[in-house]
């Protein structure tokens, strides 16, 4: 496929509205949403997306009703138990991003088990579950880590630049997302990957997450492929760069 994004990040919104529109409780929307996670992971692996980051539980989600939070935790564990072998077979490494020490211990243990099971020297893909994640918290944590290095005399504050900062984020080895998808129609970023999405292409669809199937993902990719990414340059500069760099690697 032409110009497959290396890193796709998704704000999976609309589970509650989907359930309510069918006259069901919100939890049923999350359950159906977990099925879409499986479907979209499979599709990303098939087309060669290398990194998939999913906003599965934000720092703000801790404030939801206790029964919804505990159902989300249980759904996550059910998903991991259902998908562990499939992830392993497809050489997909599970990783997490966020303050996961806040998650219930049984969830942490299950995450550790599946992360260990799916650790590969050369994974074909990374599935990054953003859990108890907040973009501002990540930036604060990076600033703290940099401050501690300065205090220990390991880092000259004058030498701190964007690359230094990026190395102190939760997943320093990851490239920035090329494409950020938000389902459920809201045009906001909701504290997701605030540092990393500086130049991401943003695609918002009214489709609610439980209705977001492979074909909808295909539409998001087609839109991404039709866009010109300029990173602050002019169109002419981009064209010039492409012609100077010879055959362009598109995927
Ligand atoms: C937002 O929908 C979604 C969440 C807060 C949780 C996302 C969880 C899943 C997709 C299922 C479990 C995850 C995994 C990784 C197996 P919302 O409840 O805010 O929807 P609304 O805007 O319609 O209320």
Image (cartoon, rainbow, N blue to C red):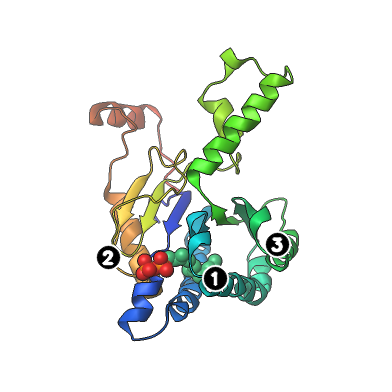
Residue at 58% in and 72% down: 70
**Is the N terminus in the top left, top right, bottom left or bottom right quadrant?**
bottom left
Cβ of mark 3 under 8 Å from ligand 1: the answer is no
Q: Residue furthest bottom?
A: 23
Marks 1 and 3: in contact by CB < 8 Å?
Answer: no
Cβ of mark 2 under 8 Å from ligand 1: the answer is no
Mark 3 and mark 2 lie on one chain; the one further toward the N terminus is 3
**Mark 3 → mark 2, Cα distance in angstroms:** 33 Å
What residue is disc 3 on? 108
Relative to 199, say whether 103 is above or below. Answer: below
Q: What x and y, as percent, mark residue 157?
A: 60, 16
**Mark 3 → mark 1, Cα distance in angstroms:** 18 Å
Relative to 6, say whether 212 is above or below. Answer: below
What residue is disc 2 on? 206
Tag 3 secondary structure:
helix
Instruction: Categorize mark 3 by other alpha carbons within 10 Å: few (<14), some (14-19), many (20+).
Output: some
Lateral position of residue 76 relative to residue 6, left or right: right
**Mark 2 → mark 1, Cα distance in angstroms:** 28 Å
Relative to 121, say whether 41 is above or below. Answer: below
């Amino acid at each position: 496929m032409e110009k497959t994004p290396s890193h796709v990040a998704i704000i999976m919104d609309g589970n509650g509205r989907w359930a309510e529109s069918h006259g069901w409780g919100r939890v049923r929307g999350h359950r159906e949403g977990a099925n879409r996670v499986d479907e979209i992971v499979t599709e990303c692996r098939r087309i060669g997306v290398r990194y998939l980051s999913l906003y599965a539980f934000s720092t703000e989600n801790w404030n939801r009703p206790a029964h919804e939070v505990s159902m989300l935790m249980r759904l996550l564990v059910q998903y991991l138990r259902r998908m562990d072998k499939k992830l392993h077979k497809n050489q997909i490494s599970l990783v997490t991003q966020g303050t996961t020490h806040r998650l219930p211990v049984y969830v942490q243990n299950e995450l550790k088990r599946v992360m260990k099971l799916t650790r590969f020297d050369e994974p074909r893909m990374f599935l990054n579950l953003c859990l108890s994640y907040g973009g501002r918290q990540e930036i604060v944590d990076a600033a703290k880590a940099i401050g501690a290095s300065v205090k220990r005399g390991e880092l000259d504050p004058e030498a701190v630049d964007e690359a230094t900062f990026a190395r102190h984020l939760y997943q320093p080895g990851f490239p920035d997302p090329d494409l950020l998808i938000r389902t459920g129609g809201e045009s906001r970023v909701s504290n997701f990957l605030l540092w990393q999405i500086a130049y991401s292409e943003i695609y918002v669809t009214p489709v609610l997450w439980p209705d977001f199937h492979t074909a909808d993902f295909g539409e998001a990719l087609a839109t991404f492929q039709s866009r010109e990414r300029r990173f602050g340059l002019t169109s002419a500069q981009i064209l010039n760069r492409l012609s100077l760099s010879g055959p362009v690697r598109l995927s």
